[in-house]
Each structure stands twice: as C-alpha cells, then as structure tokens.
Image (spheres, grey):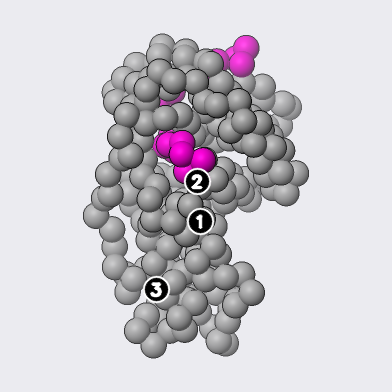
Amino acid sequence: MTILEAIQARHSVRHYIDTPIDEEKLQRLYQLVDECNAQGKLHIQLVTNEPRSFGESLLARYGKFSGVTSYFAMIGKKSKTLDERIGYYGEKLVLEAQIMGLNTCWVGLSYKKIDDVIKIGAGEKLVCLISLGYGITQGVDHKRKTPSQVSTIDITVAPDWYQRGIAAALLAPTAINQQKFKFSLEDGNKVSVKAGVGFYSKVDLGIVKYHFEQAAGIENFRWK
C-alpha cells in the first residue's frame, strides 16, 4: 500500500480486537516516532499494553471506544506552532500505521491521562492521543465538503497537482468532521492554507497540510 492508497483507505476506528501488535511493526513504529520527534521537535510517545486510558474513562465510553490498549501520546513543548506540528507528524504516523495494516483514531478528549505512563516534561503539553491497533472494522467514510468549498480559486482551472492536493486534503480527518480550512494559490506555485475557528482546528491544519503535500508533491509548490 502506498501513502496515497493509505489516504484513501484510512478511516477513524474506535473499536479494536484483543490482538497485540506484531513486534516487527512495533519496532518500525518506535523508529517512526523517533524520526517525527527529531524532525518536528516533539515528544511523541508510543504506549502499548495500557488499557486504563480508555478503559477507565467515562468520556471514552461516551465516545464509544473499546479495546484500546495502544496509542500515541502527542506531546510537545508549548508554543504557537505546537498544535500544527502535532497534526502534521501525527498524521504521518497514522498513515504509516495504515500501511502496516493497523487502524487509528485521533482522540481529543475521550481518554484518561495516566500519569505513571505518559511522561510530560516541564513546559510540555499533552495535546491529544491517537488510538492504535487492529480494528474490528475498517471504519466508514463521512460526508465531506467539495473542493470549491475549501479553495479560494476556481478548482477547475487550477494545476493538476493543486487539484490532487485538495482532493487529498478533503480526505484528512478533522475534529467532528468540521473541515474548517481554506486553501489559496498565488503566483503559480505558492500555496497557503488557513485554519478556521473551531475545536482542534490548528491540529487539523497540520493534518491537512500533510495530506496536501503527499498528493500534490512537494517539488511542485512551496508553502507561503
């Protein structure tokens, strides 16, 4: 499975079977976490065999999660860009997990922070979790906006790479499926995207930018 195929196939999954993640896959995930932490200046942690964050949370039951024993804890130093970097590098992990045959779900509130498991340093913030494991199902798609609703330019006359990027951005997971982002294209290859006002909108911005880059090809444009 390619990264673009993973973008197409991946859906949020909240219910998982009681099967440990293969050791070979875990080692690859730990390696990816290290890479993301180095590149994004983050403190992401992969937690395994830990049922309490979701099993002991009333919010998790309200959010209809079950069987979650592994997850990414998305942590970093507090800054204006933290949420966007969490979204960007978290989605990289999400899509790589999908390629490995694993399922995921971004989780904003429906969990309990376990202090003796998740390590948050001085000046750091736990932004969210990402559940991880083998899903009972592969999840379902949701209604999405049209390309013209998330672009300031006429999508029908835009370059092919821009159209591909927008299509991939529309497949990005966003909090409560709000899709509050807007792309612009100037001077042929300068792309900008703004986050709207909403729940976890800056995290969503990072996720959307990662999707856009993968489909558009970073060699075809530059971020403004």
Left or right, 93 with respect to 199, comes to right
Contact between marks 1 and 2 (CB within 8 A): the answer is: yes
Q: Earlier in the sequence, mark 1 or mark 2?
A: 1
Q: Which residue is mark 1?
A: 2
Q: Nearer the viewer, residue 92 or 207?
A: 92
Q: Quadrant of residue 66?
A: top left
Residue reaching furthest to the left: 143
Report how far apart the C-alphas of labels 3 and 2 lie in the structure.
29 Å
Q: Nearer the viewer, residue 155 or 179?
A: 155
Q: Which residue is mark 3?
A: 151
Identify residue type, mark 3: Ser
Report how far apart the C-alphas of labels 1 and 2 lie in the structure.
7 Å
Magenta segment, prevailing SS (helix, strand or loop): loop
The picture places residue 9, in percent across and down from the top left corner, at 38, 50
Identify residue type, mark 2: Ile
Identify residue type, mark 1: Thr
Q: Which residue is mark 2?
A: 99
Residue at figure coordinates x 55%, y 64% from the top left: 213
**Per the image, is 165 magenta?**
no
Question: In front: mark 3 or mark 2?
Answer: 2
Q: Residues within 10 Å of mark 3 (few under 14, many from 20)?
A: some
Q: Write the start and end of the magenta stretch as one range.
A: 98-117
Report how far apart the C-alphas of labels 3 and 1 lie in the structure.
26 Å
Residue 164, compared with residue 56, is above or below; it is below
Any part of residue 53 in sight: no
**Per the image, is 99 magenta?**
yes
Residue at figure coordinates x 57%, y 48% from the top left: 92
The picture places residue 157, in percent across and down from the top left corner, at 39, 88
